[in-house]
Image (cartoon, helix red, strand yellow):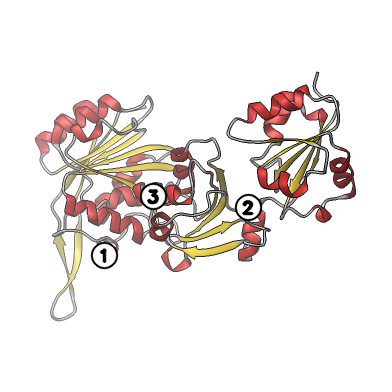
Amino acid sequence: MPPERVVVIGVSGCDASLFADGARSALRAADLVVGGRRHLDALAPPGARTVVIGADVGAALDAIEAETGPVVVLSSGDPGFFGMVRPLAARFGGARLEVHPAPSSVATAFGRLGLPWDDAAVVSVHGRDLGAAVDRVARRPKSAVLTSPASPPEAVGRALIDLGVGHRRVTVCSRLGLIDETITVTDLAGLAARSWDPLSVVILLVDEGNSPRKALAWGLSETEFAHRDGMLTKAEVRAVALGKLDLPRAGVLWDVGAGSGSVAVECARLSPGLAVHAIERSPDDAVHIRENSARHAVAVAVTVGSAPEALSCLPDPDRAFVGGGGLGVLDAVLARLRPGGRVVATFAALDRAVAAADRLGSLTQVSVARGRRLPDEGLRLVAENPVFIVWGPSA
């Protein structure tokens, strides 16, 4: 039979004098105190039985359920914010809980930086999948990650770099509220390179000088991208292809035969909720993709290899742009496309474009002539090679 009341006290700095009167009284009267080792050593009253919350939270919950006297649970910051309130409420019901929150570690961390955080993405990797957490914060300009012994700050840094995330201003906030609190400013490379206190808050910010342009713009100029000998989708063709992709707010996008990654980067800019994968066989071009991702401060995961073989390790796409590889690659992409998905492909040759249209359903030709200055400052039109854009399947 669980106790009638479980008092949950948020702790900031292991100083009981900061507790409200009700929390202090409950702690003094507790027969059982449950919490982290440092909290128990600093705050548990003499004579109270203590149980350390370890990796197995269930053992602490079992101890609480077996207790007949007053119970107090000590939890860092706000216990309702990625804290002990969730498992306690699931086991005993919220009506049995009396919660005294302290400022959350995330609120404290942003407070140390003098920044608001109502627009930040906040995730925890305590007992949660690191990949899913990193995938979420990678596409947000402001985020906070609550790290853990299994996924310390350096693991977050390595995962973000592997995902192709561009420049971020990183602040690691460790042991907040304690006498040995540290606030360290670094970048992603510095985050990944050293060992940090595993129980930290990592704040990730896109610097204003490195942030993508705020205006809604697509079909960016070729000068916005590093590339090899003009090997990138021309701006006007890219603008039409992006429209045909009909980008969703979330999901998975492939840019197959990515070249410089201009399509992948624009998709990541326009729809930050997408997980964007660029597949390119040239290692030199893959370097350009990473450079362009960093320049535009977006997350693009780069796979170096030839399609269709290189596609096997990727999640199935909701959208795909095929800029190279021919009909065999197009067929391989279609075989993996999720229901309701869409593929856009470009071709220089009419026969291949027609064959692709037989598979996808729609075809158009984009012919562009760009103005060039004459010696007398007049303008003449210089035609680019026409490109066929094929898209589908039809809804």
Q: Which residue is labeled 3 in the image?
A: 158
Left or right relative to 352: residue 34 = right
Disc 1 to disc 3, C-alpha distance: 30 Å
Looking at the rendered image, the disc whose residue lies closer to the viewer, 1 or 2, is: 2
Looking at the rendered image, the disc whose residue lies closer to the viewer, 1 or 3, is: 3
Q: Along the polypeptide, which appears first: circle 2 or circle 3?
A: 2
Report if residue 116 is visible in the image: no
User: Quarter holding the C terminus?
Assistant: top left
Mark 1 is surrounded, within 10 Å at the Cα level, by few (under 14), some (14 to 19) or many (20 or more) other residues, namely few
Q: Are marks 1 and 3 in contact (CB under 8 Å)?
A: no
Residue 66 lies, in percent from the top left, at 77, 22
Residue 293 lies, in percent from the top left, at 33, 55
Q: Which residue is labeled 2 in the image?
A: 106
Tag 3: amino acid: Arg
Disc 1 to disc 2, C-alpha distance: 39 Å
Camera-side residue of 160 and 377 = 160
Tag 1: amino acid: Thr
Disc 2 to disc 3, C-alpha distance: 21 Å
Per the image, label 2 sits on a secondary structure element best described as helix
Report if residue 339 is visible in the image: yes
Q: Which residue is labeled 1 in the image?
A: 223
Camera-side residue of 205 and 327 = 205
